[in-house]
Image (spheres, rainbow, N blue to C red):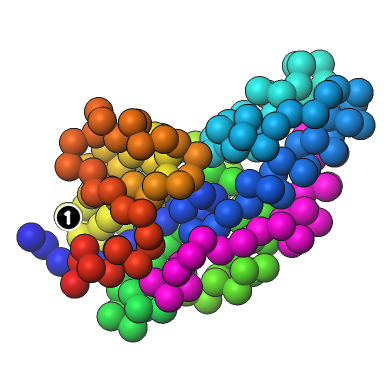
């Protein structure tokens, strides 16, 4: 097996838990527009495809742009207050860097909010590159975001692994022809893995270190 050189991570649900911040901002926005509150579970299940697509799920088309402006203003504060690292994230990243690995973020979040989370949680320094859908003009599962990262960081498909928590992450990896790790406990349930052969499944981020010793 070819040694892995580049580890690319999704952010939300994979390295960070910002679900409470998302739910708080969503329900704040809904209250401002006169809509009833939605549950934490319902909000969590709809994330991962960028904030505009997320908001389209909860607001009528005629209110969408106004709602998105309210949401984004509130979200700047909510992310700082409610974002948390997933267990062992910093330990795993530290060990990967100590082994000389390249690391990157591939997120459907807007770049402003992605970097806000990384800086709030103190992990921006661990990444050689952070790339978001708004910067490449395409959302996962379009593989462009992974292809750009591999090109910029000079890693082949065989040397790259993508780590995510959603079906769209698995599909993105499939389209990019790279190995993929599914982290349990994020937005997608384990059954989404069934149609993706050779997916490695982990419960803890520490397991990444054992998979590629």
**Total numbered circles:** 1
Q: Which residue is mark 1?
A: 158
Q: Nearer the viewer, residue 19 or 119?
A: 19
Q: Residue at x 19, y 72 (%)?
A: 213
View extreme (left): residue: 1
Q: Is 84 in the magenta?
A: yes
Residue 42 picture location, percent across and down: 63, 30
Place of residue 37 in the rendered image (x, y in percent of width and height, measured from the top left):
80, 29
**Vertically, is 74 above or below 104?**
above
Q: Is residue 35 magenta?
A: no
Coordinates of residue 18 in the picture (x, y in percent):
63, 52
| Point 35% across, 31% down: residue | 192
Give the residue displayed 45% in from the left and 36% down from the top: 188
Quadrant position of residue 210? bottom left
Position above or below: 23 against 34: below
Q: Which residues are magenta?
A: 68-92
Q: Does residue 31 appear in the picture of this structure? A: yes
Neighbour tally class for label 1: few under 14, some 14-19, many 20 plus, Cα within 10 Å: some
Rendered position, 58 above or below 113: above
Quarter of the image for the N terminus: give it.
bottom left
In the figure, is residue 130 to the left or right of 175? Answer: right
């Amino acid at each position: 097996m070819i040694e892995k050189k580049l580890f690319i991570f999704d952010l939300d649900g994979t390295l960070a838990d910002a679900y409470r911040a998302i739910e708080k901002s969503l329900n704040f926005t809904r209250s401002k527009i006169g809509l009833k509150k939605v549950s934490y579970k319902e909000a969590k299940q709809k994330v991962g495809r960028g904030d505009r697509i997320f908001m389209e799920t909860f607001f009528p088309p005629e209110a969408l742009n106004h709602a998105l402006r309210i949401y984004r203003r509130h979200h700047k504060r909510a992310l700082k207050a409610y974002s948390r690292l997933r267990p062992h994230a910093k330990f795993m990243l530290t060990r990967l860097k100590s082994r000389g690995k390249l690391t990157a973020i591939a997120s459907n979040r807007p770049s402003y909010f992605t970097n806000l989370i990384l800086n709030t949680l103190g992990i921006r320094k661990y990444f050689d590159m952070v790339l978001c859908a708004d910067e490449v003009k395409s959302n996962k599962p379009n593989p462009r975001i992974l292809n750009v990262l591999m090109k910029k960081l000079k890693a082949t498909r065989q040397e790259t692994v993508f780590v995510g928590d959603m079906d769209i992450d698995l599909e993105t990896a499939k389209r990019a022809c790279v190995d993929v790790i599914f982290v349990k406990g994020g937005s997608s349930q384990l059954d989404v893995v069934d149609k993706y052969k050779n997916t490695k499944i982990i419960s803890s981020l520490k397991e990444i270190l054992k998979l590629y010793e």
